[in-house]
Image (cartoon, helix red, strand yellow):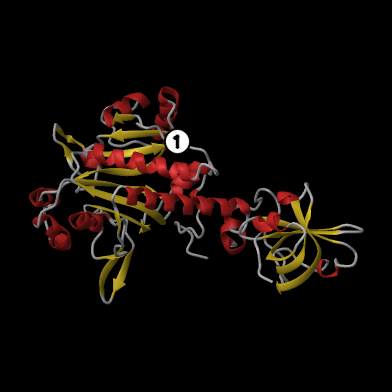
Amino acid sequence: MQRILSTELTGHLGETVTVAGWVHRRRLLKSVAFLIVRDAAGFTQVVAGDDTRGPIETLAEESVVEITATVTANPAAPAGVELTRPAVRVLSAVTVPLPLELHRPALTATLPTQLDHAALALRHPTRVTALRVAATVTAAFREALREQRFVEIHTPKIVASATESGADVFRLDYFGRPGYLAQSPQFYKQLMVGVFERVYEVGPVFRAEPHDTGRHLAQYTSLDAELGFVADHRDVMAVLTRTLTAMAAAVAEYAPLDVPAEIPAVHFREALRIVGAPDDEPDLAPAHERALGEWARREHGSEFLYVTGYPMAKRPFYTHPDPADPRWSNGFDLLFRGVELVTGGQRLHHYDDYVRALGGDLAPYAGYLDGFRYGMPPHGGFAIGLERFVSRLLGVANVRAVTAFPRDLHRLTP
């Protein structure tokens, strides 16, 4: 008999069916035994009387079972049906104590315990939901950009030089010469604008930053996009807003989120004034971002806020300056609920501008710079941190709690 999922039971009332999954919870009463079986779609309640409860009495939670039984109406059961008169076949028995409990509505184990035992903790519905949300917003990101004429690309994750020209990279031995794990696909997605005009990528990026906070990971998933023939960074922001609107719509069943048709924007100088920071402050601190998030909700009813025109001194070398005042950049950050979610902006597109911006030894960037020798249009792009977006969306304080197998300052396993 072909297996069906828990969500399909209502269509088989009165029939004999086969389900399979994990023993989520077991209750043994005097005259009846209850078994809650969990599969990828949800839960099934199984009820066994004295004549069929024998195999259930010895089952441990998380054992994998296959059950053939009759679908019976019961308004108190999940989806209004339950399985009765079950025949139970054990596919994989658990014979060791579980390091944490999965049957409770919330995981009570500490986050380090959950991460140490990720293979088990990730089965809990709250952890499953976070991973489903991540998968859903990723799919929506892809679809929204395809609809805007973007082409998906795949770029190397082992590179010859650091993207940001900084020290926060993981160095490795690449057949006897130095290589690095890519901080971002920045160089490659810019070059691919010269091929497809509009490109995007979903992939891992690596940052050897010694942060030990709830918002940083050493490896995370970046949702990147780059587009050519822009007037300035505002064209990039328009694409980002449209893309976020589609992503929010896709996850509305999990966490309703309103993306304004026009997200409010303030220049960096105005942002400093709003938070009461000195005029010469070079960047926004986390406390500044939180204050700006509160201001955006209060003044605009928006969970999002663009901060534009960051100082050029705080932006990567490929950032295009503001033509009206080159102290400021045509770059932006997007804050979501008081936390930086997206960094983006317009890039330089003339070869001579790159020579001036880089100075010194251009050899490490030769392959990258060639693209600008051969003609590149005005372009720009952005990158969304997937795990940070999901954690803010679901109201989870630590990005590790929405990441399957996080890598950070202290964790390299499992």
The local secondary structure at tag 1 comes to loop
* Quadrant of the rendered image containing residue 156: bottom left
Note whether residue 224 is visible: yes
The residue closer to the viewer here, 51 or 61, is 51
| Rendered position, 27 above or below 286 | below
Q: Residue furthest top?
A: 299
Residue 34 in the image: x percent, y percent?
81, 58
Q: Residue furthest bottom?
A: 175
The residue closer to the viewer here, 78 or 218, is 78
Residue 404 in the image: x percent, y percent?
51, 58
The residue closer to the viewer here, 4 or 39, is 4
Q: Which residue is mark 1?
A: 337
Q: Quadrant of the N terminus?
A: bottom right
Q: With 350 as the anchor, is 276 left or right in this view?
A: right
* Quadrant of the rendered image containing residue 89: bottom right
Note whether residue 101 is visible: no
| Rendered position, 192 above or below 350 | below
Residue 22 in the image: x percent, y percent?
68, 64
Q: Amino acid at mark 1?
A: Arg
| Rendered position, 64 above or below 297 | below
Q: With 293 as the anchor, is 147 left or right in this view?
A: left
Mark 1: few/some/many CA within 10 Å (<14, 14-19, 20+): many
Residue 80 in the image: x percent, y percent?
74, 49
